[in-house]
Image (cartoon, rainbow, N blue to C red):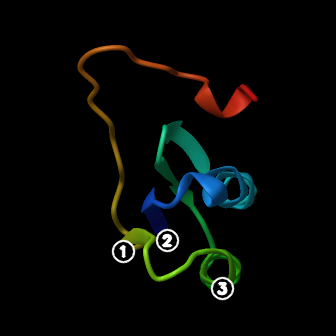
Amino acid sequence: MYVIMIYDVNTKRVAKVLRIARKYLRWVQKSVLEGMITEKNYKELREKIRKIISEEDSVYWYILNPEFVPYRKVIGDFKPNVSNFV
């Protein structure tokens, strides 16, 4: 499946959420990650994130069916290798 994860969490937890999510998905922008992931890994990632966040935080998951072929169009500053930094 293809997943897009968007999060808005307290600054105290941002680095931890990003660090865990980057193990499963590609970081494309400050609070946005995306990529192909297995159902098992998706559940594992969701559970790890759930343990970190609190009720004031939010994480959105956009799950696209396996037949979906994603493509991206960017306007503005395109950062092609964001996942390679940090």
Question: Between marks 1 and 3, how big is the CA–CA gap?
Answer: 21 Å
Which residue in the protein does label 3 denote? 47
Mark 1–mark 2 CB contact (< 8 Å): yes
Tell me which amino acid carries mark 2: Met
Tell me which amino acid carries mark 3: Glu
| Outermost residue toward the top in this view | 77
Q: Which one is earlier in the sequence, the residue at label 1 or at label 2?
A: 2
Give the number of the disc on residue 1.
Answer: 2
Q: Which one is earlier in the sequence, the residue at label 1 or at label 3?
A: 3
Q: Find residue 44 and report its horizontal and vertical position in percent.
A: 70, 82
Above or below 10: residue 1: below
Question: Between marks 1 and 2, how big is the CA–CA gap?
Answer: 6 Å
Q: Image point 73% across, 61% down: which residue?
A: 20
The C terminus sits in image quarter: top right
Residue 38 relative to residue 28: left or right:
right
Q: Which quadrant would residue 78 be assigned to in this image?
A: top left
| Secondary structure beneath label 3 | helix
Question: Between marks 3 and 2, how big is the CA–CA gap?
Answer: 17 Å
User: How packed is label 3: few (under 14 Cα within 10 Å), some, or many (20 or more)?
Assistant: few
Mark 1–mark 3 CB contact (< 8 Å): no
Mark 3–mark 2 CB contact (< 8 Å): no
Q: Is residue 25 visible?
A: no
Residue 8 relative to residue 25: left or right:
left
Q: Is residue 15 visible?
A: yes
Q: Find residue 24 and report its horizontal and vertical position in percent.
A: 69, 60
| Secondary structure beneath label 1 | loop
Which tag is nearer the camera, tag 1 or tag 3? Answer: 3
Tell me which amino acid carries mark 1: Asn
Q: Find residue 76 and report its horizontal and vertical position in percent.
A: 27, 15
Q: Nearer the viewer, residue 53 or 83?
A: 53
Residue 85 relative to residue 5: left or right:
right
Give the number of the disc on residue 4.
Answer: none
